[in-house]
Image (cartoon, grey):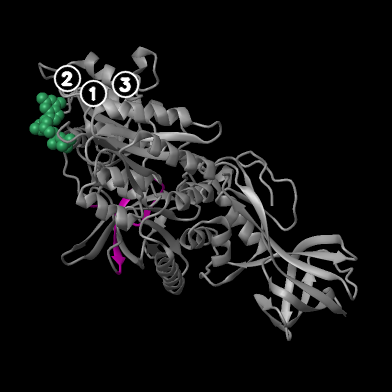
Amino acid sequence: MSENGQKGKTIEISPNITVRELSQIIKASPIEIIKILMANGVMANINQQIDFDTAAVVAAELGYEVTLETQAPIKEEDKGEIPLWRRVIADENPDELIKRPPVVTILGHVDHGKTTLLDAIRHTNVAGGEVGGITQHIGAYQVEHNNRLITFLDTPGHAAFTAMRARGAQGADIVILVVAADDGVMPQTKEAAAHAKAAQVPIIVAMNKIDKQNADQSRVKQQLAEIGLVPDDWDGDTIVVPISAKKGEGIEDLLEAISLVSDNMDIRANPKGRVIGTVIEAEIARAKGVMASLLIQNGSLEVGDVVVAGNTCGKIKAMFDYLGKRVRKASPSFPVSVMGLNDIPQAGDLFQVVDSEKDARMMIDSLNQAKAESESDQKSVMSLEQLFDRFQAGDVRELRLVIKADVQGSLEPVVSSLKDLDKGDIAINILHAETGMISESDVMLASASKAIVIGFNVQADTAARRLADSEGVSIRIYDIIYRLIEDIEKALKGMLEPEEQEVVSGHAEIRAVFRISKVGNIAGCYVTDGVLHRNAKMRVIRSGNVIHEGWISSLKHLQEDVREVRQGFECGVAIKSFDGFIVGDKLECFSVEKVAVK
Ligand code: GDP
């Protein structure tokens, strides 16, 4: 196994591998693998064997190149944190992709005017309805601007957005960050910006309340520049649109800015493709049963379709749009409220259409099984070591941090010493740095962004600790800067190219060679010490010289396929692409493990 020092990683696997084994090799959760298999139309549970080609597809989605033999790894693009629905679109036939409306979410500090802005947009431009007409609350609506549609998620506050990101299903293409011109950049403004940046979603700033006497636009622009959102009229690349949501001023300019930004993005989907999307919200409504608002992200959802959403499923009995009108079909970027699910999914869950209710139940069973198993394996809080394993599994070549310190005077040296640690291709990405206690929202940000929370001379409040436990987020608290730096440095080293270490597990002696037609030669062996493992490599040694090294392709004991054979037992061994065994050869079974650079 080798690393080429570039972003792609190569792993070697045997021709047949179970979901669990693959998850262990690439250090991804089995759920993630099952989800990718499902997205590729394969139903599998955690113990199921998948063939080499299927494993290669899954591994490629997680940023790994798979080989059967040692060969030069191929450079792969860093996939980062790409939501599943985006990967589904990426796999569609490019000729069938067409433009879809951009999906926009509004974030910002409390009282800066998010709700007022959403109302103002809804009342001036709602698509398909009377101006000022009553829209149904389904968590999203659409407006028309210059004959083009824009979809707005209208659950203000970033709780919903964070929940979506935490489940890897982030739904928005563009974030509108509302900042009140009289109040300026506040903690939640920074947090929202950090979320959007970590999700790589472009930000448009709506500078609100410009009608107020104490509005100070240039002060706010200065503050925006300080958090990395340099306004376009200051030669930066963040569009800042002055508005008054209350008076309905600047709304057209804001919609124009959205069109402009979306024109520069690849906002497309295949309306005829696999149906996948995100649950916006769900509730039990009197007389109607479970009502779930869904945002379609690829394919077209139709009445009668069988849907799996998170942990639940059902056949769609009826669908309504944001005007309360019944619809039979909904295409990409359209929000609909659907009737027919058996239970309430969670906001941020992915949904997809499957062929039958039987498939739906199978899918849910295997997700539940995988979840139960990975929960029982998982320690509640991750160590730095486990954390960098996750970075490697996701091929994320950066260590993401949320930093809290007691005072500005200690925050600055912590941040600048961490930036000094930045090592070439592995970056330290400080998502958020602020003074104050570690709060629930810091943990949320870390969980959604696969980051760790660092506290310097501060503690985490009870709610933050509880959430960190349930989400598996690591909180590390320090009172001496060099200890903090030392620990992060260790983590970085672990993330740097790990060294490979060979582990020999056992030896065997060839006592007979059997010729099996179509399969080739099988070595009849006696295990002299240790143990031979099925998913390992074998060295063939003749008169003290290694004559071949390769993967074991079959390991049998008394005609049965087995995972391992211990000292004192006999077995049949076949090696991939080799059958020149002779009686008297010795076999050495070994595997290659990665260890952190010391
Ligand atoms: P949210 O918490 O961000 O959703 O903020 P709201 O939309 O609830 O607005 C908070 C307060 O600011 C309300 O009293 C609004 O009437 C007021 N407000 C919102 N936009 C404007 C504006 O453009 N100008 C003025 N003067 N007040 C506004």
Using the image as rendered, state which of residue 61 and residue 353 is in the foreground. 61
x then y, percent, for residue 252: 27, 25
Q: Which label was assigned to residue 210? A: 2
Above or below, comparing residue 402 to residue 319 in the picture: above
Residue 542 in sight here: yes
In the rendered structure, which disc, 3 or 1, sits on the residue that comes first in sequence?
Answer: 1
Number of dots carrying numbers: 3
- Front disc: 3 or 1: 3
At x 22%, y 40%, the residue is 437
Q: Residue 489, image x and y in percent? A: 47, 38
Residue 57 lies, with reference to residue 398, above or below; the image says: below
Left or right, 497 with respect to 531, comes to: left
Front position in the image: 478 or 89 = 478
Indicate which disc residue 226 carries.
Answer: 3
Which range is magenta?
A: 324-342
Mark 2 and mark 1 in contact? Answer it, CB < 8 Å: yes
Q: Is mark 2 within 8 Å of ligand 1?
A: yes
Helix, strand or loop at label 3? It is: helix
Helix, strand or loop at label 1? It is strand
The nearer-to-camera label among 3 and 2 is 3
Is 417 drawn above or below residue 127 in the view shown? above
356 left or right of 541 in image: left
Q: In the image, what residue type sits under mark 2?
A: Ile
| Residue identifier under label 1 | 207
Q: Amino acid at mark 3?
A: Glu
How busy is the neighbourhood of tag 2: few (under 14 within 10 Å), some, or many (20 plus)? Answer: many
Q: CA distance from mark 2 to mark 1?
A: 7 Å
Q: Is residue 270 left or right of residue 317?
A: right
